[in-house]
Image (cartoon, rainbow, N blue to C red):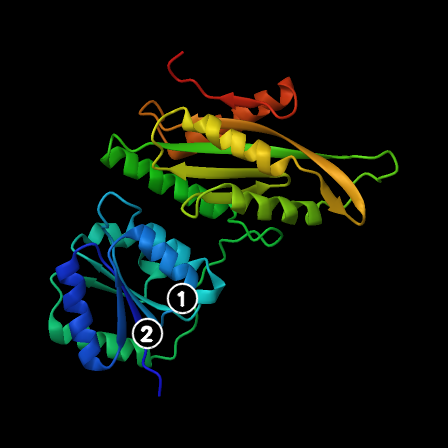
Amino acid sequence: MNKMQVLIIDDDKDTANFFRLVLELVGFECEIVNSAKHALARLAASQPDLILLDMRLGLEIGGEDILYQIRSNPRLDRTRVIIITAYPTMAEPVSNLADLILLKPVDVEQLRTLTSRLMLRNTGTKRIEFRDPVTDLYNREFFVTRIEHAFERFRRFKDFMFALLVYEIQASPVSADAPALEDYDPLLRFVSERLRRCFRPTDTIARLSGEQFASLHEDLKQPGDIHILQKRLRERLTDPYEIDNHQYSLHFSTGAVLNSPKFATSQEMLERAVQAMTQARERGVDELEIVQLDD
C-alpha cells in the first residue's frame, strides 16, 4: 500500500525536520520545502495528500497566499491542509479553507494523533470557485482578495512594492472578408493563455468582467518595472489570433498603479487603476496610463 504523501512548508528548518520526524514515525512519506517560491513550484508538479503550512514564511509570499493557490486548484481538491502558526489572528481570515489549525509550539502526540485522524476522515473537497468559467483565470472576487493581502503586507513592510494593472482588449479583423466577432469566448481563452506566459508564476492574473483583465505584480524592484510589464503585454498579446480560419488583431489599453500610503483601501487602488485604463482607452489603443499620486 502506498504511503500518504506529505508536503511540509516551513522556512524554519529545525521545525520542518521535527514535523517530518514525527510524521514519518506515523507512516507518512514527507518532503520539506523551506520557501514560498519553492512551495509553489513543488505544488505545480505534485499532488500531496497532506500539507503542513506555516503562515509566516519570512518576507516572501505569505502562507495565506499559498493556501488560496491550493484551494483554487481543482487538481488539489482532495489535499488536506493543516495550518501551523504562532499567530492565531493570521489564520482567522482563512480558517474556512484549512482542514485543521495547530498553534505553535506543537506537541508531538497532538501532531501525530490529529494528522492520523484527519487523513482517515472521509470529507468532501474544500475548493472554493475562484476561477472564471470562460478563461480559467482568477475571477474578480479572488483578485480583490489578493489585492487586500498585498495591501496588508505593504502596511507591515514599507519597502514592499507591488503594482496593479488593468487592461481592456479590443479585437478587429485583419482582412476585409473576416466577419466581426460575435462570440468572444474563443478569443478570451486565447488571451488568457498568452497572459499566463507573460508573467511570473507568482503574479495573479484575473478576468474582471467582459473583455477586462487585471494582474497583480508583487515584490517589484523599482517603479519603472511597470513599463517592463507593459512591454511584455505588447509583445505577447498583439500577434494576430486565428479563429475559424480568420485572423484578428488585438489592441489593449492599460491602466497601472503602484502601491502608496496615500491609498486608504485596496478597493481605492483598483478603482484608480480602472480609471487610468479608461483614460488610456480614450487616448487611443495600446496606450498606458499610470496613476501618479505625487503630482
- Check the picture and name the quadrant holding the N terminus: bottom left
Figure quadrant of residue 200: top left
| Amino acid marked by disc 1 | Ser
Can you identify the residue that label 1 sits on? 46
Q: In the rendering, at what x and y percent does residue 46 appear?
A: 40, 66
Q: On the picture, is 116 further left or further right than 245?
A: left
Q: In the rendering, at what x and y percent does residue 135 appear?
A: 60, 51
Q: On the picture, is 239 further left or further right than 200?
A: right
Can you identify the residue that label 2 sits on? 5
Residue at the image position 52 percent from the left and 30 percent from the top: 230
Residue at the image position 71 percent from the left and 38 percent from the top: 240
Q: In the rendering, at what x and y percent does residue 163 appear?
A: 41, 32
Figure quadrant of residue 191: top right
- Check the picture and name the quadrant holding the C terminus: top left
Figure quadrant of residue 42: bottom left
Q: Are marks 2 and 1 in contact (CB under 8 Å)?
A: yes
